[in-house]
Image: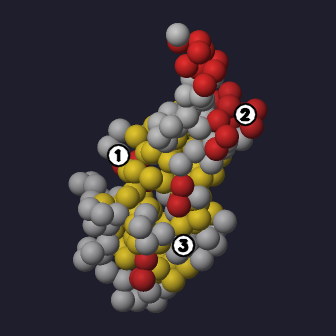
């Protein structure tokens, strides 16, 4: 498995000419399709131009470089608005549907072929990362992609502790309410 940030900064090489086209600037994926869709290329010109390459033009995402086919062209549908990119979502808060803050989204994890999304890496902060490492959430845990937070299903939720539709735990002060014992206590 690979992480998106591992390929950012790698040179992009055209196989037929051996020419370096630029450096990988960002990675785009489509959450619903669970697929890597494109990489954006920083051409390194005086006026920085970032141009997306479709994943179909990528021959291989290697350890030290990304190789592209002879037909590789920038633009088209690569990096559409429906696609997410590391540059736009890194640092966004991740919160569970039960209201627990897991930390911030830091990276995505994809298969070795560089095509299928495997999960999202979440940082719990410097100390949390050092003590227990970063958590990787499966893509199907994501419920909502918000502009300020990503809402995920709480994978550690204990159904026995759920309290109504909102979730959470039942307060000890409420124990007994809803049964005969609670009625007697209220009278």
Up/down of 184 relative to 115, above or below: above
Circle 1 sits on which residue? 146
Q: Tell me which label, 1 or 3, sits earlier in the chain.
A: 3
Circle 3 sits on which residue? 116
The local crowd at label 2, few if under 14, some if 14 to 19, many if 20 or more residues have their Cα within 10 Å, is few
Using the rendered image of the protein, determine whether residue 84 is visible from the camera's viewpoint.
Answer: yes
Left or right: residue 118 compared with residue 51 = right
The residues bearing labels 2 and 1 have C-alpha atoms spaced at a distance of: 28 Å
The residues bearing labels 2 and 3 have C-alpha atoms spaced at a distance of: 28 Å
Using the rendered image of the protein, determine whether residue 18 is visible from the camera's viewpoint.
Answer: no
Residue at 59% across / 15% down in the picture?
Answer: 184
Left or right: residue 75 compared with residue 65 = left
The reply to whether dot 1 and dot 3 touch (C-beta < 8 Å) is no
- How many numbered marks does the figure carry? 3
Identify the image quadrant of the N terminus: bottom right
The local crowd at label 3, few if under 14, some if 14 to 19, many if 20 or more residues have their Cα within 10 Å, is some
């Amino acid at each position: 498995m690979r992480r998106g940030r591992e390929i950012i900064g790698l040179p992009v090489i055209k196989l037929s000419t051996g020419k370096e086209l630029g450096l990988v600037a960002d990675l785009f994926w489509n959450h619903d399709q669970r697929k890597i869709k494109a990489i954006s290329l920083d051409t390194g010109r005086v006026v920085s131009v970032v141009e997306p390459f479709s994943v179909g033009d990528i021959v291989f995402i290697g350890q030290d470089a990304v190789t592209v086919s002879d037909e590789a062209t920038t633009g088209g549908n690569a990096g559409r608005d429906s696609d997410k990119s590391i540059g736009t979502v890194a640092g966004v808060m991740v919160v569970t549907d039960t209201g627990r803050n897991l930390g911030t989204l830091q990276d995505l994890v994809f298969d070795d072929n560089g095509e299928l999304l495997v999960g999202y890496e979440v940082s719990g902060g410097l100390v949390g990362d050092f003590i227990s490492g970063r958590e990787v959430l499966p893509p199907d845990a994501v419920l909502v992609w918000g502009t300020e937070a990503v809402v995920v299903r709480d994978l550690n939720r204990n159904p026995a502790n759920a309290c109504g539709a909102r979730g959470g735990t039942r307060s000890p002060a409420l124990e007994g309410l809803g049964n005969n014992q609670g009625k007697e206590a209220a009278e």
